[in-house]
Amino acid sequence: MPNKPPTETGILHAVVVSDLHIGLPFFRKSAFLKLIESLDAETTLILNGDIVDNPYQRLLPEDEAILNHLRKQSFERRVIWIYGNHDEDFRMSDPGQIEFSRNLALGTRLMIIHGDDFDTIMPNNRWFIRFFKFCHRFRLRLGADPVHVAELAKRWAPLLYRVLTEQVKKNAIDCALQGNFGAITCGHTHYAEDFSDKGVRYINTGSWTEEPLHYLSVSANDIRLLAYNHVLPEALQTENSRARSSNEVLEAQI
């Protein structure tokens, strides 16, 4: 189980996203940029792991531009980067004021952690993972539709994929119980869901490599998992802004 997370009590408004996998062609760059450009300055942006796909890969200029934009954002709002299994060795040459951590707690309301700590399926089946990725690369060479390997796993290995998502969910809930957290949010599985068990709410924000895209909206009074459909998300406005707005868009709570 992971170490005790550092606790934040001053974050009242936050947006949490996970699994951008910057560097892959499947990352929905334009949608992500539109999302963060819609944030109020008082909204904290929390990047919950696997933000970069491969820390040792040279990024294309358009991918470097995303990282540079995140660095600039850190001077306008708090940006907190939670490491995942893909990006734990990644270091930005100039991170600006981006804060880095392995996990985070918003009081006892919410624990934020990528989720790979709760996964023993992938580490114990590396041979299958390698073979599956080999088949995926071979498929792409043959001209098949370019999709992220996780999307194929949902189609071709649904049983193993379900075992993975259920294990991460169960272990995350147990971790939250041990830490007396009311809710816990993860990524890692690329499967967005909002589930409650044993008095703990488990929220997975999915990924930004395959549709539908999701993010977690945290306010002083509410925590909502929302689907992003390329419309300016009204749910990201502050409590006062929401009170002034009568146009409810994008509130697709799972």
Image (cartoon, rainbow, N blue to C red):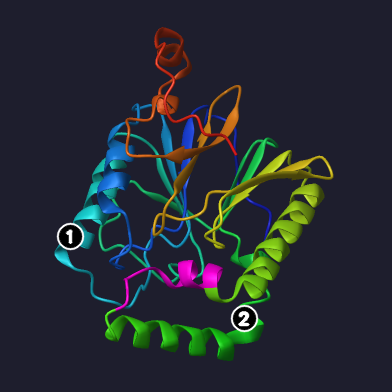
Disc 1 crowd rating (10 Å Cα; few below 14, some 14-19, many 20+) is few
| Quadrant occupied by the N terminus | bottom right
Q: Is residue 33 above or below residue 175?
A: above
Instruction: Examine the structure image and report whether residue 45 is included in the region drawn in magenta.
Output: no
| In front of the other: 35 or 1 | 35
Q: Amino acid at mark 2?
A: Pro
Q: Amino acid at mark 1?
A: Glu
Say left or right for 196 vs 189: right
The residue that label 2 is drawn on is 123
**Residue 147 in view:** yes
- Span shown in magenta: 144-155
The image position of residue 212, as x and y in percent, is 44, 49
The residue depicted at 34 percent of the width and 31 percent of the height is: 39
SS class, disc 1:
helix
First in residue order: circle 2 vs circle 1: 1
Give the image quarter of residue 236: top left
Point out which mark residue 218 bears: none
The residue depicted at 43 percent of the width and 67 percent of the height is: 87
The image position of residue 150, as x and y in percent, is 48, 69
Say left or right for 28 vs 131: left
Point out which mark residue 62 bears: 1
The image position of residue 51, as x and y in percent, is 40, 59
